[in-house]
């Protein structure tokens, strides 16, 4: 089927390339590929992306801890996963960070009109044997009243307090907000 279509395809390809170049609008040296943010089998790890934090204490395993670069300088959100490897339920009762003295546990609910809205929660249960994900668009650690906004590449400490008496500290890098729920510029 692809016998005599070489020339039209080449012309079309050139046109598409021109559209892509002129439509981007970014700086000429901008080599970012936002659509390829998966980090599987990376042949050339990005040196500017520090690894997400992890920690363990008792039956609790904390992984993928990170903080979003603040969009509003005085507040940001922290994300991580909490696994309960034991056979008793554990509840996260409090979070704190080295960024400020004011931290809340939040989730995101959809209002009847369809808007997403952050709502404080008292605590976050981690059922026995399960993993709870705090991620963009859902449960998160809300950091408020930040006096000195962190930059991408900085690291802050997240301290989690649980109802079984465990307190877990995890180092969380500050990363660009590349949420799967879209950009809000
Ligand atoms: Cu929030």
Image (tube, helix red, strand yellow):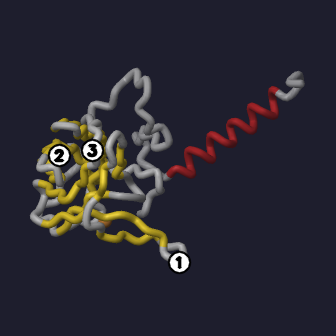
Tell which tag, 3 or 2, sits nearer the viewer: 3
Q: Is residue 162 left or right of residue 177?
A: left
The residue beneath circle 2 is: 154
Left or right relative to 123: residue 166: left
Q: Nearer the viewer, residue 1 or 148?
A: 148
Where 111 sits versus 77, above or below? below
**Residue under the image location 22 percent in, 38 percent down:** 59
> Do the residues bearing badges 2 and 1 touch, measured as CB atoms within 8 Å?
no
Residue receiving disc 1: 112
Q: What residue appears at the point 29 percent right and 46 percent down from the top-left corner?
A: 80
Residue ID for mark 3? 88
Label 3 close to label 2 by CB (< 8 Å): no
Image x and y of residue 16, in percent: 67, 42
Q: Give the left or right position of residue 110, taking residue 96 as reference.
A: right
Marks 3 and 2 sit apart, C-alpha to C-alpha, by 35 Å
Cα distance between the residues tagged 2 and 1: 38 Å
């Amino acid at each position: 089927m692809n016998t005599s279509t070489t020339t039209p395809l080449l012309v079309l390809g050139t046109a598409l390339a021109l559209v892509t170049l002129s439509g981007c609008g970014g700086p000429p040296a901008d080599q970012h590929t936002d659509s390829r943010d998966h980090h599987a089998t990376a042949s050339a790890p990005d040196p500017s992306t520090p690894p997400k934090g992890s920690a363990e204490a008792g039956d609790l395993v904390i992984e993928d801890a990170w903080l979003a670069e603040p969009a509003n300088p005085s507040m940001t959100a922290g994300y991580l996963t909490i696994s309960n490897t034991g056979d008793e339920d554990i509840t996260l009762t409090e979070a704190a960070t080295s960024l400020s003295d004011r931290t809340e546990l939040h989730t995101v609910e959809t209002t009847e009109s369809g808007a997403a809205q952050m709502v404080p929660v008292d605590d976050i249960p981690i059922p026995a044997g399960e993993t709870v994900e705090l991620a963009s668009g859902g449960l998160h650690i809300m950091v408020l009243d930040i006096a000195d906004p962190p930059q991408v590449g900085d690291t802050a400490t997240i301290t989690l307090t649980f109802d079984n008496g465990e307190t877990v500290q995890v180092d969380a890098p500050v990363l660009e907000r590349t949420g799967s729920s879209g950009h809000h510029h």
